[in-house]
Image (cartoon, grey):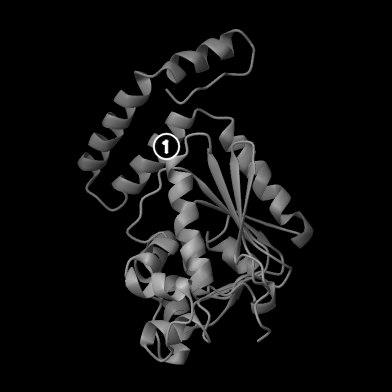
Amino acid sequence: MTADRNEPHLLEEVRGDILLLTLNRPEARNAISPQMACRLSDAYARYAEDDRLRVLVLTGAGDRAFCSGGDLALTMPLLTGAREPQDDWDLRVLEDPAMMDRSALRHTAIDKPIVAAINGACVAGGMETMLATDIRIAAETARFGLPEARRGLIPFAGSLARLPRQIPHALAMEMLLTGDLIDAERALSIGLVNRVVPQAEVLARALCVAETIADNGPLAIRQIKRTVRLATGVPLEQGFALEDEAKRVVMASEDAREGPRAFMEKRPARFTGR
């Protein structure tokens, strides 16, 4: 593996009301280092708290990989105790047991949309990261898989709970137990991704989706995501109660009055999130 460059392992760019995060270790197939995990955790927290940001787009640097998972030379040995901490990033991971969970959006609720622009291989922890996103645009060259069992390990960043909820049980178990990879077209056919496009178009298409979402009412978008998240897997009547609460919040808002008024006046709506 090539040594890391003296660049941040995660790049952040604000484009209007969209936050673009780029996993930035192309020489390591964007494997998740302790630094990347810490930066992801911090970026997610800022996104959740900043009302000016309406949609997050997550992608990988280069044209080989979205993310190849946890770095087997840096992160995994640190977590197992086989490697001593060497810098402040390592220490943060060891001193904060929830750091890796937050970097994978595990035990962390963000009620704002996340769009994945999957520019290449999306395996192991990379696929687990993708499973925490809401909408996924994949390159034709993308490959997906959870090969942990082949190394005597298990996916522990959300896949065991998330994957069987997102695709049929038998297909999820096949991916988890065999460790086999699937191509982008197969991922599309089983509902794992939304669209497959030429690699050169992945980020542009993901940003286009993000812009469409960002034009919608931000309060409505948050309530939609929150309600779907909380209602998944609960009894239907409990889901209806969550839906009723979301309706109460949204229908009492200024945005709920502005949207129909703008439609009647044939002009773009000016949403404020209130």
Decide if residue 207 is on the left or right side of residue 259: right
**98 vs 176: above or below:** above
Q: Is residue 139 visible?
A: yes
On the image, which quarter does residue 90 sit in? bottom left
Q: Is residue 167 visible?
A: no
Q: Which residue is mark 1?
A: 222
Location of residue 67 by image quarter: bottom right
Quarter of the image for residue 247 reads top left
Measuring from the top left, give residue 121's x and y in whole percent.
63, 72
In the structure shown, which secondary structural element does the residue marked by tag 1 occupy?
A: helix
Q: Relative to 216, does residue 19 appear above or below in the rendering?
A: below
Q: Is residue 265 left or right of residue 163?
A: right
How many neighbours does mark 1 have within 10 angstroms: few (below 14), some (14-19), or many (20 or more)? some
The structure residue drawn at horizontal position 65% and vertical position 87%, both measured from the top left corner, is 1
- Which residue of the protein is positioned furthest toward the top in this rendering? 265
Q: Amino acid at mark 1?
A: Arg
